[in-house]
Amino acid sequence: MATGRTHRPATRSRGIPEATVARLPLYLRALTALSERSVPTVSSEELAAAAGVNSAKLRKDFSYLGSYGTRGVGYDVEYLVYQISRELGLTQDWPVVIVGIGNLGAALANYGGFASRGFRVAALIDADPAMTGRQVAGIAVQHSDDLEKIVSDNGVSIGVITTPPGVAQQVCDRLVAAGVTSILNFAPTVLSVPDGVDVRKVDLSIELQILAFHEQRKAGEEHEGTVPPVAAHQDSSEQGPDGDVPAVMPA
Amino acid sequence: MATGRTHRPATRSRGIPEATVARLPLYLRALTALSERSVPTVSSEELAAAAGVNSAKLRKDFSYLGSYGTRGVGYDVEYLVYQISRELGLTQDWPVVIVGIGNLGAALANYGGFASRGFRVAALIDADPAMTGRQVAGIAVQHSDDLEKIVSDNGVSIGVITTPPGVAQQVCDRLVAAGVTSILNFAPTVLSVPDGVDVRKVDLSIELQILAFHEQRKAGEEHEGTVPPVAAHQDSSEQGPDGDVPAVMPA
DNA sequence: ATGTCTTTGTGAACGCGTGCACAAAGATGG
DNA sequence: CCATCTTTGTGCACGCGTTCACAAAGACAT
Ligand SMILES: NC(=O)c1ccc[n+]([C@@H]2O[C@H](COP(=O)([O-])OP(=O)(O)OC[C@H]3O[C@@H](n4cnc5c(N)ncnc54)[C@H](O)[C@@H]3O)[C@@H](O)[C@H]2O)c1
Ligand SMILES: NC(=O)c1ccc[n+]([C@@H]2O[C@H](COP(=O)([O-])OP(=O)(O)OC[C@H]3O[C@@H](n4cnc5c(N)ncnc54)[C@H](O)[C@@H]3O)[C@@H](O)[C@H]2O)c1
């Protein structure tokens, strides 16, 4: 039952650290905004501020792509947009299927920003016969019986799963068998996939629980004068006092 | 404009590493499933498999919470559910507001799994007068003019932003000024917040771009016989061949 | 009580990611 | 052509996170 790849080598991909890859879209977004304002060049300091990262980190990230900057001047915005887009594979079109057209699936289908970066919703798939043929975001929903055919006919390699958790693994298996090699999973399930298939998950519930953890800590700090309430998190955290640890053990 | 905290100490929170905190919800989910099947105890090996992590990592994670296992037997499921819930602050109720009731905001409001873990949708807020008063998921949408009052009246400390990116920062500022100290941001924007406020972001576009990066690499590998196509990613990646790097520099 | 067998808890090694600090590169002005 | 000034690219050190491997702890049978 739901194993999921245990090991994550987290090794370099084409020499580019995974952490860097995860930040490239952030840089790209900031650069695109600059491009739209017709800003010709930008310094690492400015761009880093816009992307919310350390400037040294940004420079090191770019150094993995090559030496695209000019000392004393900065980076050419248009050129960098192109380089990062190419590196991320956004210069080509990526057909995507969304499986499970409920609340969330429909919202994603309606999401405009989807297509803005080379991702095209190739098909919407649902198991509910009542949904079949219905138009969502201008696209006719197709029945999941045809999943394999839809995937192969459209050359889909990226699948988005927005089904209930109970069927997510089996939907995943079918997608993979049909040729999908990248999956974005919104269902709260650990997916098990063969080697060579990438899975990324988006889990609202987990995010909220992490926030709750820090929230609880902040609330605790107020009463116990341990550390001054000066603390910044963006995604991280720091120390905190204990509270109560009822050392009761069950039978 | 939009700076975002640059530094992330990523230090221990109450002695618990941030990476561990992020996995606790995963363990909790697996444990809850076991609990529902009335499984009394579970070994680190079994639980790790269910959560999709390394068993040594799981044991080390639990060791930060205390010694809750019994050697030769494993962990008491119910007890662990309680301990993790308490640690994450899920034994109390967290009122949450969602700002921006469009496609995504409405989907989140309708999401059942929201309330299942101590999170309660206290209010839905939108700037569109046409939305005001409309019922979404059984809750009347309120106008954003009343944001400050809604937050303080309900003692809300967690806010979810699902507005268009252009207004996300100003909505964030108002939430923070009103007393919100944790924000879950779905808008593709880097939010700038004062110290003491946690921000977590969920960005569909970034996830897809990361998948595209690896997808592109896989496609490239097929043609160039560099490394046998045996490779597993869950969230990571590995090496890959180059391709073409047109060393053209712009003016 | 003693031995065996299972499973935890953790010491230690290692690798990745981060950020400081600075030398080198190149632009710009005289 | 030289001096100055800005900004990149990176060497280096440090800390967090991961994983291996194993001793200790306890259950269970005899
Ligand atoms: N809605 C949210 O905000 C939200 C947030 C976080 C996580 N999630 C998760 O996302 C998933 C979808 O949530 P939702 O609110 O849209 O649920 P939903 O019930 O509204 O939609 C699920 C859809 O999947 C379809 N479906 C069921 N089995 C299928 C199958 N085998 N093949 C294809 N389609 C199938 C159903 O017909 C339905 O249309 C759930 O796993 C949920 O836990 C949702
Ligand atoms: N829909 C998706 O699947 C999806 C996916 C990824 C990211 N996003 C992001 O999530 C956000 C919302 O997406 P959406 O598709 O729901 O957009 P939407 O346009 O359907 O909804 C936005 C809502 O915010 C409201 N709003 C605007 N300004 C406001 C303000 N100042 N205060 C309060 N409410 C305000 C609007 O009235 C509207 O109801 C966007 O930033 C989008 O980029 C959406």
Image (tube, coloured by chain):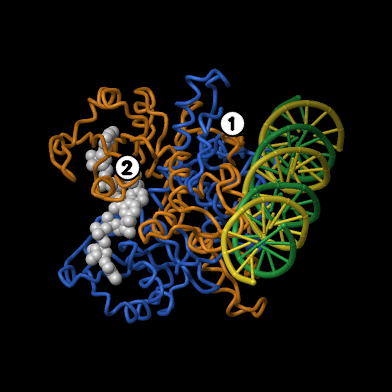
Chain colours: A blue, B orange, C green, D yellow
Q: Which residue is mark 2?
A: B162
How far apart, in angstroms, are the residues tagged by discs 2 and 1?
Answer: 30 Å
Q: Which residue is mark 1?
A: A239
Packing grade of label 1 (10 A; few <14, some 14-19, many >=20) is: some
Kind of residue at badge 1: Gln
In this view, the residue in front, B214 or A1, is A1
Tell me where residue A40 appears, x and y as whole percent: 53, 42
Q: Quadrant of residue B165?
A: top left
Q: Quadrant of residue A66?
A: bottom right
Is residue A198 visible to the viewer in this orientation of the structure? yes
Tell me where residue B118 appears, x and y as whole percent: 33, 41
Label 2 within 8 A of ligand 2 by Cβ: yes
Q: Chain of mark 2?
A: B
The local secondary structure at tag 2 comes to: loop
Ligand 2, seen in the image, is in the quarter at: top left
The local secondary structure at tag 1 comes to: loop
Along the horizontal axis of the image, is B10 left or right of B113? right
